[in-house]
Image (tube, helix red, strand yellow):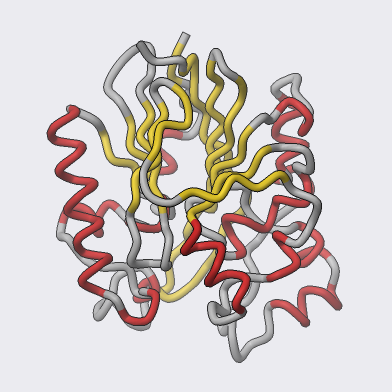
Amino acid sequence: MTSAIRMRPLLTAVHRYDKSLSTRGRDQGRIIEAPILAYLIETKNGRVLYGVGCDYRKISNPDLRAKYYDTKTFPFGAPEMHEEDRLPNHLARLGLTPADIDIVVLGHMHFDHAGGLGELLGAEVHVQADELRVACSGRDGACFADDFGGNHHWKVIHGEYDICPGLRAISSPGHTAGHMSLFVELPKGSPVILCGDAADLQENLREEVAPGICWEDRVDDALASIRKLKRIAREERATAWPSHDMGFWRQIRGWTQGA
């Protein structure tokens, strides 16, 4: 029986960029708006966050913004993020504080999914060993080393595992070296697979299109992960959720599933 009680999607920022960053080999020149989401999952064993969004300081401070989002590496600039989008403010609106978060699951360590770690000191941070290794090496330009350089309690994982009853980490590399998605079994309705950046858009899943950015051009790994997530969804009668699809976000905005 699942320990999950309810799940809420949280909009932490919006980024505008060329769609080809999400769909490999197509849609160059088409600018899209992409939500940057985190998911709060309440379980009988504690509260879990899948993804933590961006570091607000690096966006709100002009000097830091120029340093971290230089035009050579980030031609489309920084995401749009406001004070109310910070995780502590999302949690406060739910009557919670960062101290109420027990586990952070990092699907991967890019700036838009790991940047908010500094707001959540004290939580246990779960990450795949390959993901942490590459992020710490400095070889992935979308990872900001000081996002994950604080005094965190790391749980470094090798492969798939159960976080708690009803929450299972799914290995889904390709976009990054150690990307992981999250299977969530809720007390009511169909299970959900939070794909993370294994599938930015519904199009990635529907048409089996690899993400535009693949670690070391490992497109085959990315496509294998998409097909794996689709297979699990069929077998478990689950719904696969893309991570950066604005149309999909508008469908689930305000959605809360569970007791």
x then y, percent, for residue 27: 29, 76
Quadrant hosting residue 216: bottom left
Q: Is residue 67 visible?
A: yes
x then y, percent, for residue 257: 43, 19
Q: Is residue 55 above or below residue 140?
A: above
Quadrant hosting residue 147: bottom right
86 and 224: which one is in front?
224
Query: Residue at coordinates 77% horizontally, 38% vertically from top-left?
Result: 122
Q: Is residue 55 left or right of residue 128?
A: right
The image quadrant where one finds the N terminus is top left
Query: Residue at coordinates 66% horizontally, 30% vertically from top-left?
Result: 102
3 and 58: which one is in front?
3
Q: Is residue 175 above or below residue 186?
A: below
Q: Is residue 255 above or below residue 81?
A: above
Quadrant hosting residue 136: bottom right
x then y, percent, for residue 135: 58, 69
Query: Residue at coordinates 77% horizontally, 74% vertically from top-left?
Result: 65
200 and 145: which one is in front?
145
x then y, percent, for residue 46: 61, 21
Q: Is residue 246 visible?
A: no
Query: Residue at coordinates 42% horizontally, 76% vertically from top-left?
Result: 18
